[in-house]
């Protein structure tokens, strides 16, 4: 079943959605500064995880080519649309379980604000406005509204993704986190 197609997504990002598998989304200008460098380096690790990934954006040719070819190689796991599409961006942010915002630097940022509004859990690097608006979830206290990682390193990104994936399967904690986000 190609549920994404049924939700009026572009055919460029249609792939079978597995409802019990966490869907990570990223909507951004494709640039190293926005974290695509880390995402590119983390790709092998990501492919080994139980997750799906959808990307929307345009920008640096190297990232457009790289992520476009990855989507073609792993169509059941990764969907990519190289474009600027505000309507689709909101659908991805609202429909994803986790929004990735692994920016190297980010003075303010709106993506995480949209994610919080929709109840999509932001996973951000602790920099600029991302650090100011997203706070690490603590399941023992039921406090926090997302996942935050510090050093701009693949290992730090993957540790945060692994935290999100582990929590996703604990539905009560995940619902608390989503409510906190909203």
Image (cartoon, rainbow, N blue to C red):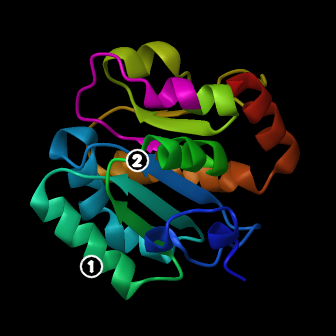
Residue 164 percent location from the top left of the image: 61, 48
Residue at the disc numbered 1: 69
- Residue 55's quadrant in the figure? bottom left
SS under mark 2: loop
Residue 140 in sight in this render = no
- Residue 136's quadrant in the figure? top right
State left or right for residue 42 relative to residue 78.
left
Residue bounds of the magenta highlight: 100-114
Asked if residue 98 lies in the magenta stretch, the reply is: no
- Which one is in front, 143 or 39? 39
Residue 129 percent location from the top left of the image: 38, 16
Residue 109 percent location from the top left of the image: 37, 23
Exactly how many numbered labels are in the figure? 2
Asked if residue 109 lies in the magenta stretch, the reply is: yes
Residue at the disc numbered 2: 85
- Which one is in front, 54 or 176? 54
């Amino acid at each position: 079943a190609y549920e994404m197609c049924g939700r009026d997504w572009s055919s460029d990002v249609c792939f079978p959605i597995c409802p019990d598998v966490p869907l990570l989304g990223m909507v951004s200008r494709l640039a190293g500064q926005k974290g695509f460098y880390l995402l590119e380096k983390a790709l092998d690790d990501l492919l080994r995880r139980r997750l799906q990934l959808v990307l929307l954006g345009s920008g640096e040719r190297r990232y457009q080519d790289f992520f476009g070819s990855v989507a073609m190689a792993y169509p059941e796991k990764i969907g990519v649309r190289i474009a600027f599409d505000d309507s689709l961006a909101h659908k991805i942010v609202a429909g994803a379980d986790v929004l990735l915002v692994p920016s190297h630097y980010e003075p303010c940022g709106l993506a995480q604000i949209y994610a919080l509004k929709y109840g999509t859990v932001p996973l951000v690097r602790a920099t600029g406005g991302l650090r100011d608006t997203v706070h690490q979830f603590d399941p023992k206290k039921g406090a926090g509204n997302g996942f935050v990682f510090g050093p701009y390193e693949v290992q730090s990104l993957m540790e945060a993704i692994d935290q999100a994936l582990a929590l996703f399967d604990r539905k009560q904690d995940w619902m608390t986190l989503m409510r906190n986000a909203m």
